[in-house]
Image (cartoon, helix red, strand yellow):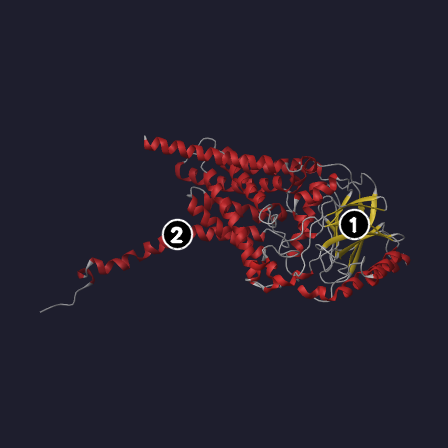
């Protein structure tokens, strides 16, 4: 007579799935921990950028990234770095798909994330060295330097420095520019990870490896101390007196790529708001400006070829009675278009021009047009490419030297520095953000101008077609700003300054030193690897 077997009588193979389930679950969680942490680190970097005033999230972001990469092989570091890059750049660059759909946005974010992934491989390699937070931070700067140059002239958006406009580290921009500021922030983040790593070692062994505590402490304390020591470089004093500047925001008829289908309406909006400002000046409600700044694309009608547009601009400038910078699109019979700023005198008309030197790929010109057309028909919206200028933009407006960096150029270190070394006493960044709607793009770009103000110790005036226009002091603080998609005029007395910060004097040298430091760290790590393999083979 047979009996029904009990659980004790069951074959071991049948019991294994139940007894191993908890261990398999723990194993799965362990495998997912690093990828999840990599994505979270990228999201923390994104959340540290404007419009959120959460700049400090960058520190746990890099601490978490350091945990993900420490002790990893190259293949794993690449994958984790790619996840971190996507977690960071996908939300940060979402505005690039505002009117053209997800394909350009996803392609750009993926391409930029590849730079982050390769950079993270380098960080994992140097993490095996003594003083690894220093080498790792330098490798991050190397990655940002590469992103800012290739392809198509580079895309520096998302440089860590641009998220630090409200940060305690901001004064370091005046010491060595955005590369040095970014290096200090990343070093501090990696230092936090090292401090936690040393603490865990102490918990388990009741001792800290020689020099470990000092390395962790210095990696955190030195960047903060350096930022405090750099505070005297942040100066709002009016070394060369003051000037009263006006920034006009005329607004656009409608959001999106088709806003410029009503080019005359955009021009009329800016002319009308300038004439209203003139009435306010006459009535004594606001002070008379020494000069007026219109935004990029405030006249997409070429005033040299369109007499009606010229008349509208001339009437508005005569009404305000001050030299005015007008953003125009010039359309020569042959060759490429020009994104041009025109200095317009109330008596003499146009007297000087500046052609934007770094035109935006896939926005103002289309590289590989036939290939890009396969993925997006919006490539044909740019029927005629813009060409770059070759002269530094500095206008003399009523005796004030004003440096010009048009919109996208504010992201490039050289494009802003050249104006200051060229004699600019203040900087203006005329921009057109209408094609990006109410996205975070305008706040990200405004933060760049705030960092540039501290980097070069200059007031910065940002006139934008549809917002946010702003007046920024040399310490990076916004003293006036407009609302988005609202006609407005800002009038402010701004300090004029002629002294040069160390960052301005040194130019690309700090970045070059940090890139060389990264190269030295990678070379040292490679040499150690070769020697280790030789010892193993022996």
In the displayed orientation, state which residue is furthest to the left: 1
Marks 1 and 2 sit apart, C-alpha to C-alpha, by 59 Å
Compared across the picture, whether 224 is left or right of 482 comes to left
Question: Which comes sooner in the sequence, label 1 or label 2?
Answer: 2
Residue under label 2, please give it.
Answer: 31
In the displayed orientation, state which residue is furthest to the bottom: 1
Whether residue 256 is visible to the viewer of this picture, yes or no, is: no
Would you place residue 361 above or below residue 392 in this image? Answer: below
| Location of residue 54 in the rendering, given as x and y in whole percent from the top left corner | 60, 51
Residue under label 1, please give it.
Answer: 353
Between 378 and 463, the residue placed more toward the observer is: 378
The C terminus lies in quadrant: top left
Residue at position x 71%, y 61% in the image: 484
Count residues near mark 2 (Cα–Cα under 10 Å), then give few for <14, some for 14-19, many for 20+. Answer: few
Count residues near mark 1 (Cα–Cα under 10 Å), then give few for <14, some for 14-19, many for 20+. Answer: some
Whether residue 429 is visible to the viewer of this picture, yes or no, is: yes
Q: How many marks?
A: 2
The N terminus lies in quadrant: bottom left
| Location of residue 252 in the rendering, given as x and y in whole percent from the top left corner | 74, 64
Residue 366: which quarter of the image? Answer: bottom right
| Location of residue 32 in the rendering, given as x and y in whole percent from the top left corner | 41, 53
Tell me the mark number nearer the camera, choosing from 1 and 2: 1
């Amino acid at each position: 007579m047979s009996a029904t077997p009990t659980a004790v009588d069951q074959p071991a193979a049948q019991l294994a799935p139940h007894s191993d389930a908890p261990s398999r679950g723990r194993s799965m969680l362990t495998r997912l921990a690093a990828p999840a942490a990599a994505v979270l680190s990228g999201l923390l970097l994104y959340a540290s950028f404007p419009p959120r005033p959460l700049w400090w999230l960058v520190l746990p972001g890099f601490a978490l990234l350091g945990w993900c990469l420490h002790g990893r092989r190259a293949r794993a570091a690449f994958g984790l770095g790619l996840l971190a890059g996507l977690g960071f750049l996908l939300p940060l660059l979402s505005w690039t798909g505002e009117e053209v759909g997800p394909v350009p946005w996803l392609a750009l974010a993926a391409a930029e994330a590849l730079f982050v992934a390769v950079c993270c491989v380098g960080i994992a390699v140097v993490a095996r060295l003594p003083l690894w937070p220093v080498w790792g931070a330098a490798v991050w700067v190397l990655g940002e330097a590469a992103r800012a140059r290739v392809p198509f002239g580079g895309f520096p958006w998302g440089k860590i420095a641009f998220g630090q406009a409200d940060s305690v580290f901001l004064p370091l921009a005046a010491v060595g520019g955005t590369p040095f500021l970014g290096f200090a922030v990343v070093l501090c983040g990696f230092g936090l990870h090292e401090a936690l790593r040393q603490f865990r070692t102490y918990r388990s062994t009741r001792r800290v490896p020689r020099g470990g505590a000092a390395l962790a402490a210095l990696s955190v304390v030195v960047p903060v101390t350096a930022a405090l020591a750099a505070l005297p470089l942040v100066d709002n004093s009016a070394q060369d007196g003051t000037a009263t500047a006006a920034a006009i925001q005329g607004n656009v008829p409608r959001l999106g790529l088709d806003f410029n289908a009503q080019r005359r309406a955009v021009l009329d909006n800016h002319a009308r708001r300038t004439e209203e400002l003139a009435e306010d000046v006459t009535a004594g409600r606001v002070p008379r400006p020494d000069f007026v700044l219109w935004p990029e694309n405030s006249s997409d009608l070429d005033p040299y070829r369109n007499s009606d547009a010229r008349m509208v601009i001339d009437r508005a400038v005569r009404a305000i009675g001050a030299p005015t910078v007008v953003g125009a699109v010039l359309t020569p019979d042959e060759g490429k278009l020009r994104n041009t700023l025109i200095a317009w005198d109330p008596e003499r008309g146009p007297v000087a021009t500046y052609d934007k030197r770094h035109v935006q790929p896939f926005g103002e010109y289309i590289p590989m047009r036939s290939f890009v057309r396969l993925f997006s028909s919006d490539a044909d919206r740019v029927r005629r490419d813009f060409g770059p200028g070759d002269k530094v933009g500095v206008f003399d407006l009523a005796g004030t030297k004003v440096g010009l960096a048009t919109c996208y150029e504010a992201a490039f270190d050289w494009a802003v520095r050249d104006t200051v070394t060229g004699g600019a006493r203040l900087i203006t960044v005329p921009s057109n953000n209408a094609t990006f709607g109410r996205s975070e793009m305008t706040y990200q770009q405004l933060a760049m101008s705030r960092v540039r103000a501290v980097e070069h110790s200059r007031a910065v005036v940002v006139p934008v077609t549809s917002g946010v226009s702003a007046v920024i002091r040399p310490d990076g603080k916004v003293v006036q700003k407009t609302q988005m998609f609202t006609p407005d005029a800002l009038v402010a007395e701004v300090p004029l300054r002629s002294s040069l910060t160390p960052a301005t004097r040194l130019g690309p040298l700090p970045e070059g030193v940090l890139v060389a430091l990264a190269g030295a760290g990678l070379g040292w790590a490679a040499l150690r690897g070769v020697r280790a393999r030789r010892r193993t083979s022996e």
